[in-house]
Amino acid sequence: MKNYSLTFDNDRFDIDITPRDENSVVYELLENEESLYILAPFPDQQEDLLKVYYPIDSYRLLSKALQTSMFWQFIFLSFIAVIISILFSTYILKPLRESIKLLEIFIKDIIHDLNTPITSILINLKMMDAKNDEVESITKSAKTIAMLHYNLDTYLKELQYKSEKFDIKEVIEEQVSFFAPMYDYLKWETHIENMIIKSDKNALSRVVYNLLSNASKYNTAQGKIYISLQENILAISNTSYGIKNPTRIFERFYKESDRGLGIGLHIVDKLCKELDISIEVKVEDTLITFLLDLSKVTTK
């Protein structure tokens, strides 16, 4: 606009003559309701000023067109950036994905190879007539390895679940009788009535096993484990040193200490979803309670 005031070589602007006053400012962009304009002095006279102006409506249309053009350029460049990022990420992560795939295949092979000897050990232990501490210790160790085997199998596979009727009290008492002697320094309290439910007994046993295993391993020296069943709610409580992030305890591989694999509670959450059992955790100071809602699997 300033150059135009010197050469008049542009058809986008209009010109006018306006009288000079004490408030007139030359060679600065000004604005009123009708236009954008500048004022330029004439070389040989001081009374009038040359007004070069650009209609405000044309300016707004041009500004809007420029904004639209910049918006679509931004969208296009963002799309190109996303495509490049995806291709780059795919290329960079390919070795990692292949390593994870090989690791999963390796774990599956180990699980498959462990299945036969574990089953054989458990069957032979049941056939043995000997009743002594050594045999019982071997039996418990074998069952612990078997449950770890089942946990890994559940983590890696989409298993088929069956529906059968059984007494939840039997499942809980079986697991308590397994853990209580190993953690005899803990105080165990159970208040369970007989209740028939319809679900997968093996899967629910693994849920109870993992919860009691977690409650035992991360308890205090003179702690307590309390199990109750009231109005279709199975509650498993234990004393502990507290949980830093209660909202993350069901995440895969999440753990707050160096012990364990970090998949036990994740498997509990996964199995509960498959069995249509709601589960939640409550933390009150040093008391942790897992609540399992069995109302959808109870028999009427």
Image (spheres, rainbow, N blue to C red):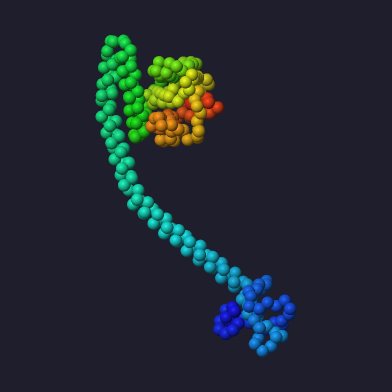
Residue found 67% across the figure and 72% down from its top: 32
Farthest bottom residue?
44
Residue 257: horizontal and vertical position, in percent? Answer: 43, 31
Which quadrant would the N terminus be assigned to in this image? bottom right
The residue closer to the viewer here, 55 or 52, is 52
Residue found 47% across the figure and 60% down from its top: 75
The residue closer to the viewer here, 142 or 255, is 255
Residue found 50% across the figure and 66% down from its top: 69
Residue 84: horizontal and vertical position, in percent? Answer: 39, 57
> Does residue 192 appear in this view?
no
Residue 265: horizontal and vertical position, in percent? Answer: 43, 30
Tell me: residue 107, above or below residue 134: below
Tell me: residue 70, above or below residue 203: below
In the image, taking residue 91 as reference, residue 245 lies left or right, namely right
Q: Quadrant of residue 176?
A: top left
Farthest right residue?
22
In the image, taking residue 293 as reference, residue 267 lies left or right, namely left
Tell me: residue 169, above or below residue 37: above
Residue 162: horizontal and vertical position, in percent? Answer: 37, 27
> Does residue 283 appear in this view?
yes
Q: How many marks?
A: 0
In the image, taking residue 67 as reference, residue 85 lies left or right, namely left
Residue found 61% across the figure and 76% down from its top: 54
